[in-house]
Image (spheres, coloured by chain):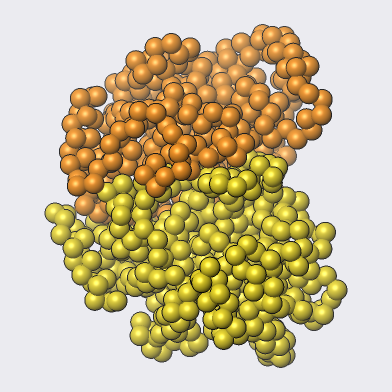
Chain colours: A yellow, B orange
Amino acid sequence: MQSRVEHLSTTATSGPLQRSKIKDMSAEVVDSNPYSRLMALQRMGIVNNYERIREFSVAIVGIGGVGSVASEMLTRCGIGRLLLYDYDTVELANMNRLFFRPEQAGMTKTDAAVQTLSDINPDVVLESYTLNITTVQGFETFISSLRSKSFCPSKEGCGVDLVLSCVDNYEARMVVNQACNELNQTWMESGVSEDAVSGHIQLLIPGETACFACAPPLVVASGIDERTLKREGVCAASLPTTMGIVAGLLVQNTLKYLLKFGHVSPYLGYNALKDYFPTMEMKPNPQCSNSVCLERQKEYALAKPARDAAAKAKMEAEAPSEIECLHEDNEWNISVVDDTDLQGPDVGKSSGALPEGLVHELPSADEFQKTPGSEESANLVDDLEDLKRQLEAINAD
Amino acid sequence: MQSRVEHLSTTATSGPLQRSKIKDMSAEVVDSNPYSRLMALQRMGIVNNYERIREFSVAIVGIGGVGSVASEMLTRCGIGRLLLYDYDTVELANMNRLFFRPEQAGMTKTDAAVQTLSDINPDVVLESYTLNITTVQGFETFISSLRSKSFCPSKEGCGVDLVLSCVDNYEARMVVNQACNELNQTWMESGVSEDAVSGHIQLLIPGETACFACAPPLVVASGIDERTLKREGVCAASLPTTMGIVAGLLVQNTLKYLLKFGHVSPYLGYNALKDYFPTMEMKPNPQCSNSVCLERQKEYALAKPARDAAAKAKMEAEAPSEIECLHEDNEWNISVVDDTDLQGPDVGKSSGALPEGLVHELPSADEFQKTPGSEESANLVDDLEDLKRQLEAINAD
């Protein structure tokens, strides 16, 4: 895999004015320095240590309208390593979104992405996986690639720092959810509606926030009659604007999460017709049908005394004069959800108490489990063996 | 100018798999149709007539981090004609933003943009103007290019449908403001802060909304101490995320404005640290120092009876059952500002009544007129002759 990536990079870098690799990020203000405007974030007091970005690995699942732009943004920001997953090929029908070029039609999206990204910034380590994560073989490769620590052997836990889900269907999201629950891996989910005028991003921390199976997916209400959307044989609409904005919000929150600045949004919606951006937090569902999620919830509850002690020590160490909490340095940069009431009645349920403009994608948790083409999923994925059986059933269709 | 553009297009289109021009936009759902996902907006009930996009001309002033992405989005959407204005060249220091590629370093931004855009969509008519609009000669070419109706001789008023300001300095914004006031041309302004973590877009309709000289510019508060930003010799920070999001919001509102769907935001801010998006409306200042703005305000007030009659006729023609006003088809797609109280005391003033998170860029109207390097601008631009004198003084520095 790696050798093919290097071959592609060499092919792509045969142009006349190719930029060479840069060993250390410099803050020097000269026209020839591609990192000067990023290192300036440090001098402006936004980021403590921008250069740390080179230590991070981010996996992007789905290199379509959102994932491709997210990969370009992270590449231009000088991320350490990108892992790219897709099985699709570039078509002219994709040209209404950013990133891919007409002459790349027919290439796999992963190959085309590696070609473009290595050209833009040869400092980024690119790993491309041309596979479908919803197949048994694909899922195994997906999991093992996320575990691999070859890029940073000293790293704790998983081999990547964040997984970005940029897929366009429910099954693939459930597979990312299963993998991240198993690996105890924080991830961000993104989506754009079929009518192209709304989208969202969501932060998922196993055990701490709702997982993707805890509650029916939330979508931003567009104000358009749903019945006009779901007609048979109608292809989904898409716009470079909506997808570029969702990719931008996703990568902005990725940068805040990795480089520990600002506030990472637990959920952020975008309604393009009204320029409305609803936010909310979702606690895990103690009745979640995903058994690994329940394990993570238990672990998170058990670690509460240690978290409280750490938070107390941190508060005492900090000057009491610090009123603004923009640079609050808590581990996840999100506002703390009180985890004592995990057993509350409304947790993770499809209650009516949603912020204005947000609706559940499907009317109820029971209904949303019956997605077309996966009758088996009425019993939600419990473990890898279960998942494998379900995937086999789905792919046999 | 046009002939050079055509030459560049030919050079750029020598690749192996170049897509050919498409005469009519088709909604056919095949992989080879670059417009299928856009035409789907019609079938989904979002847009009445997507194909009309080919009739529109948009001018983009400043092809930097925001303007280049805006030009790519409009090109991929199949806009009729784009007019591009910039005098700068591509540098490796620009590579932390989307669009330009390292091998384009040294080219003018306009040439590089035409190369990339004509490659992406040869159906778009591109006009490139490598000039500085704040010089006398540049301003004259700018005005006459906006007036030209060669693309659509039957067009009323100006030759373009919208001007997008994507410049990075106060003087250039004031020049765009002067040109649009003179031409009675609606435009949108955009900006990104020097610390790269906030931005905004604003709709300016001569006579109807505040012009750029009516009030000190509004910026989104980042929560970062301003004193750390304005230090001498510190280069501005920038991020592909913030600039991509601002470009996306700008073009999304451009599409809503041109194709008459949704609500066009009069002002939309973006605070990246908090994912906060303040909105507001700004009425024109009856004491505006720009005399052309005052003329436009008078014209707008005089046309009130005709507007009221048209609005009444429209309301009567529409079914009373139509409660949702998403597709409200008023001329500018914005909520109507009551124009009877133009003489109100707070109009266009630096009052304390700003929405949370918005601050004036400079403490007061008096102070904001004294920008560095333009001592003359204490008397704000009144007419073209005045502007010329001031520009000459500035450029003689």
Q: Percent position (x, y) of residue B100?
A: 31, 49
Name the one closer to the observer, B313 or B61: B313
| A25 w.r.t. A179: above or below | above
Q: Residue at x 52, y 24 (%)?
A: B186
Q: Is residue B182 visible?
A: no
Name the one closer to the observer, A1 or A377: A377
Q: Residue at x 40, y 16 (%)?
A: B152
Q: Percent position (x, y) of residue A56?
A: 42, 75
Q: Residue at x 64, y 74 (%)?
A: A376
Does B254 sit left or right of A339 as displayed? left
Q: Percent position (x, y) of residue A240?
A: 47, 46
Does A83 sit left or right of B15 as displayed? right
Give the total of numbered labels.
0
Does A11 sit left or right of A243 as displayed? left
Residue B200 falls in which quadrant of the image?
A: top right
Name the one closer to the observer, B208 or B39: B39
Residue A299 falls in which quadrant of the image?
A: bottom right
| A240 w.r.t. A210: above or below | above
Question: In the rendered image, which quarter contains the N terminus of chain B?
Answer: top left
Q: Residue at x 58, y 77 (%)?
A: A390
| A51 w.r.t. B328: above or below | below
| B91 w.r.t. B280: above or below | below
Question: In the rendered image, which quarter contains the C terminus of chain B?
Answer: top left
Q: Percent position (x, y) of residue B321?
A: 82, 29
The outermost residue toward the front is A397
